[in-house]
Amino acid sequence: MAFWSNWFGGSSPPGTTPRAAFQQAGGGIVVTTAQQLEEALRAGALSASGAMVTPDTAMRVAAVYACVRIISGAVATLPLHIKRRVDERTREDASDDPLWMVLRRRPNRWQTPSQLRRMLQAHLLLRGNAYAMIVRSRGRVRELIPLHPDRVEVTQTAELALDYVYTRADGRRIRLAQHEVLHLVGLTLDGVHGVSPICYARETIGLSLAMEDHGATTFRNGARVSGVLKHPNKLGPEAVANLKAGLEAFRAGGDQDGKNLILEEGMDYARIAMTAEDAQWIESRKFSRTDIAMFFGVPPHMIGDTEKSTSWGTGIEQQSIGFVAYTLEDHLTMWEEAINRDLIGPDDALYARFNRAALVKGDIKARWEAYVKGLQWGVYSPNEIRALEDQNPRDGGDVFYPPPNTAGTPEREDGATEAAPRREDTDT
């Protein structure tokens, strides 16, 4: 067999089994035998609908793109704080630690913190895992270099530690130890590898891709007509030509809108309404969109599907609260624990925490109602509230007011006490 046949085709040697040839260009694969089809199905690339479902092709589905954008955007924009435990009751910002600079200012030489977090969260949602190489200097974290999950292989050693092998673009393989990798894992069934919604939603996403392709093909080929002309007899070539010319003249320009079409020789016009197949196709697209949102844990109204929402009031609001409590909180906790494990390590004085209160930064009414209650019950001082609003402190603002139903004088942060303020002084 010739050299080029070994690389680009030709018959296989006796005793060998042809393997499926994956084609990246065009988003499909070439399958020529039943065994190749079985291998493609087992590899998880081909769905039962015939559409190839990969993280890249899945992002072409509007519902998948919206879910990934919403979740990764929320993780990227929430403030991430590095705190230090001073004692059992006191916490402070660890802005003097190099890790604070990495996570809050410059994670690497080309990305911002929100870009890095959005990228890693998207990797996690589409592939179940996200990796970043940890660059340390003198034991301190200096940079986080994102690694594409498709190029990372992770195994568990006999000592139960994790071992990573990263394949570079030039083909070189780099082995990394567990302490050199920030590893974000979503839902996992073996404790090492995360599983992705794309894996289990493959058939739903494949059906959506197939339906979109079917609809696009139908419109491209002009297979959908609005009506037909019926003639009791057979038309001759001259009559057909005259009829076509009349129809073209009627359809030319917008000045014919609303006018009547003149039919001759007993011809009749019949309008074609939407068929049951068309209605079922549209309904199936709605179901697939809702199912995809369910796989990602995103309320349907957040991706634009408001058809079955109870209302734009309480129902929508409760769904949004559920998204924060049951979907977003899961991702935020995963990030915090991964940072504590891989970046902070045994230093129990430091810890990472997202500021969940920033989720209501777009709702000024809810934000200020919380401030007023925190001020009245002595949770916040006026200057702490001003700091949350990025405003400078004011004189006498470091005071905590006693709760309304308790007696006493307010206590300042320095331990001194002041006369209880008048009620009008507590208005915000």
Image: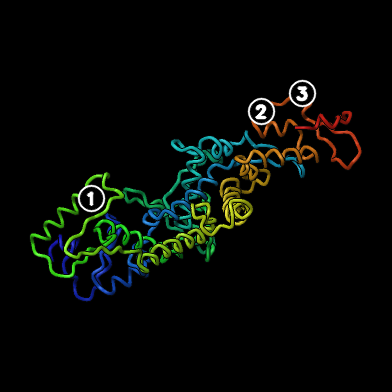
Residue visible at 15% across and 70% down in the picture: 233
Q: Nearer the viewer, residue 44 or 274?
A: 274
Callout 3–callout 2 Cβ contact below 8 Å: no
Label 1 belongs to which residue?
251
Element marked by disc 2 = loop
The amino acid marked with disc number 2 is Gln
- In this orientation, does residue 22 appear? no
Q: Which label sits on residue 391?
A: 2
Judged left or right of residue 306, residue 153 is left
Percent x, y of residue 97: 61, 36
Callout 1–callout 2 Cβ contact below 8 Å: no
Chain-order first, disc 1 or disc 2: 1
Callout 3–callout 1 Cβ contact below 8 Å: no
Label 3 belongs to which residue?
395
The amino acid marked with disc number 3 is Asp
Chain-order first, disc 3 or disc 1: 1
Q: Nearer the viewer, residue 201 or 361?
A: 361
Crowding around mark 2 (Cα neighbors within 10 Å: few <14, some 14 to 19, many 20+) is: few
Judged left or right of residue 129, residue 353 is right
Image quadrant in which you'd find residue 80: top right
Residue visible at 39% across and 57% down in the picture: 58
* Residue 270 drawn above or below residue 372: below
Image quadrant in which you'd find residue 428: top right
- In this orientation, does residue 91 appear? yes
Percent x, y of residue 178: 51, 53
What's the distance in space between the residues labelled 3 and 1, CA to CA? 77 Å
Crowding around mark 3 (Cα neighbors within 10 Å: few <14, some 14 to 19, many 20+) is: few
What's the distance in space between the residues labelled 3 and 2, CA to CA? 13 Å
Q: Nearer the viewer, residue 402 or 216?
A: 216
Q: Nearer the viewer, mark 1 or mark 2?
A: 1
Element marked by disc 1 = helix
Give the quadrant of the N terminus: bottom left
